[in-house]
Amino acid sequence: MKHVNESFPENFILMGFTKYPWLDLPLFFGLLMSYMFTLLGNIAIILASQLDSQLQSPMYFFLTSLSFLDLCFTTTTVPQMLFNLGGPNKSITYVGCMAQAYVFHWLGCTECVLLGIMALDRYVAVCKPLRYSVIMDHKLCLQLSSTAWLIGLGNSLLQSTLTVQLPLCGNQELDHFFCELPSLIKMACVDTTVNELTLAVVATFLIMGPLSMILASYSYIAKAVFQIPSADGKLKAFNTCSSHLLVVSLFYGPGVYIYMQPSGDGRQDVTKVLTLFYCVITPMANPFIYTLRNKDVKGALMRLLRRAISSKRI
């Protein structure tokens, strides 16, 4: 039993930026504000897409899926980070840490695939507009969305289970803000070559596969946009697609650096900042990116707000 306890401790100490204790308070308030904006923005997108009859196209089905995914993604990590930053207790239970690792990896992989599917949806909308509603019917949208969630779940079960089995030999200090697989692998006291190789290979497929789909889709979209005769049509297509491309850049950029570099390369502090960026800043920014560049979403949100105000008056 003693060996088991040493290999798998009851608690982990999340180191975060403990070398810079003066950062705890600014980070706490920064994360709190970001989390509140994330909840507000993504819930608003979900409500507008579900309640407004003008936002019933496949594009907004996938946007709703992305918003729900971002809500889950941030809620997996941010409340725990706020708890640790807001007081002297920097620990997390072993069970809580493993659950967080499983769910975080599941949601992150799902978002990778979902962003690729959204690019495919934009390709059909711009390049085959007359058949868009026929091709991207509700059944296909559900199948594509479910596929993204299942791929993410399958990869998380594989990667996280391999990581959970690694003995830690009493090591309790996790050099991160939360339980993420690369940091957990580094804690192991045995050879982790198989884990690192599996993580790198699968991450390459999960990142480069959807990214290749995105680049291919947008190469066809760019060609089609230049053939649109009206300036208004070109502008609408550009605004819709540029929003998605910006979201893709914010999410994939840090992910490529963290998951596709050899283990041990790069500064850990840089990795922590980039992880905070794609798991906190990107989910907060997504609703604003889509809202500010999309007249339909802005209109739906205004109608939703007016409806809420008028219902209160009654």
Image (cartoon, rainbow, N blue to C red):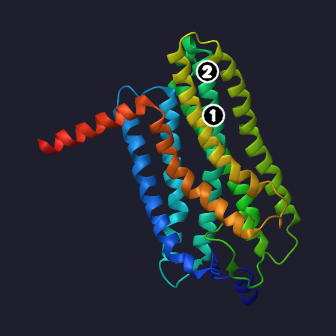
Can residue 147 be seen? no
Distance CA(mark 1)–CA(mark 2): 11 Å
Residue that numbered label 2 is attached to: 124
Taking depth in this image into account, of 295 and 212 the one nearest to the observer is 295
Question: Residue 171 shows which numbered tag?
Answer: none
Q: Percent from the top left, x then y, of residue 302?
A: 31, 36
Residue at (80% x, 64% y) in the render: 266
Q: Percent from the top left, x then y, of residue 71?
A: 49, 52
- Mark 2 surroundings within 10 Å by alpha-carbon count, few (fewer than 14), some (14 through 19), many (20 or more): some
With respect to residue 201, does 128 lie above or below?
above
Residue that numbered label 1 is attached to: 117
Q: Percent from the top left, x then y, of residue 310?
A: 17, 39
Is 13 displayed left or right of 219 in the figure?
A: left
Mark 1 and mark 2 lie on one chain; the one further toward the N terminus is 1
With respect to residue 200, does 5 lie above or below?
below
Residue at (66% x, 36% y) in the render: 116
